[in-house]
Image (tube, helix red, strand yellow):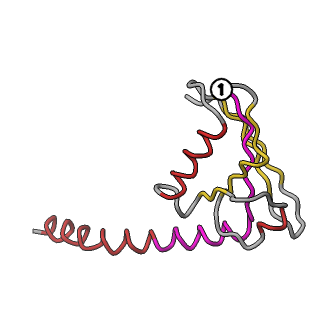
């Protein structure tokens, strides 16, 4: 609800052997530049979003993204700054490959969480039986 009217997003899904493109319209409160925004996304891609976000280093076409595991590949070459607060950001992705890769990541996470939580749940159940 807090983002209502602040983010407009479009995605095009075409059933052909090519990558997909998402265009994200962003309106920021603080005035910034596309270069600053790109630098911030690059920093995030090396920190919190290292398995999710990639920042492209050169221009591509949609077929170049086939087999790419990232959820989003930010294209700073196609992205546009509309004014000091508004941007049109382009993200390429391979829907099938990134979905499969992230499903495997989810399964790994669930497995780790299960291994960490099961002994705790077992102790709680044993304590309740006493």
Write the start and end of the magenta stretch as one range.
85-108
Say whether residue 97 is magenta: yes
Residue pictured at 71% horizontal, 48% vertical: 76
In the rendering, at what x and y percent does residue 100 appear?
A: 65, 72
**Residue located 73% across and 33% down the image:** 81
* Residue 80 falls in image quadrant: top right
Q: 55 left or right of 108?
A: right
- Corner quadrant of residue 33: top right
Foreground of the two, 72 or 74: 74
Q: Secondary structure at mark 1?
A: loop
Name the side, left or right, on which 27 lies relative to 1.
Answer: right
Quadrant (top left, top right, bottom left, bottom right) of the C terminus: bottom left
Q: Is residue 20 left or right of residue 127?
A: right
The quadrant of the picture occupied by the N terminus is top right
Estimate how packed mark 1 is, as few (under 14), some (14 to 19) or many (20 or more) residues with alpha carbons within 10 Å. Answer: some
Q: Residue at x 52, y 68 (%)?
A: 106
Nearer-the-camera pick, 68 or 3: 68
Q: Is residue 43 above or below residue 130?
A: above
The residue labelled by disc 1 is: 85
Horizontal and vertical percent position of residue 7: 67, 33
Give the x, y percent position of residue 46.
50, 58
């Amino acid at each position: 609800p807090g983002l209502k009217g602040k983010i407009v997003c479009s995605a095009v899904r075409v059933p052909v052997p090519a990558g997909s493109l998402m265009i994200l319209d962003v309106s920021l409160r603080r005035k910034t530049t596309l270069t600053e925004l790109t630098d911030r996304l690059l920093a995030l891609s090396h920190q919190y979003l290292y398995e999710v976000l990639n920042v492209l280093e050169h221009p591509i076409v949609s077929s170049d993204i086939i087999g790419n595991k990232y959820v989003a590949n930010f294209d700073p070459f196609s992205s546009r700054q509309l004014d000091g607060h508004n941007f049109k950001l382009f993200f390429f992705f391979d829907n099938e490959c990134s979905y499969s890769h992230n499903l495997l990541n989810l399964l790994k996470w669930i497995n780790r969480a299960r291994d960490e939580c099961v002994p705790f749940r077992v102790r709680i159940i044993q304590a309740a039986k006493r």
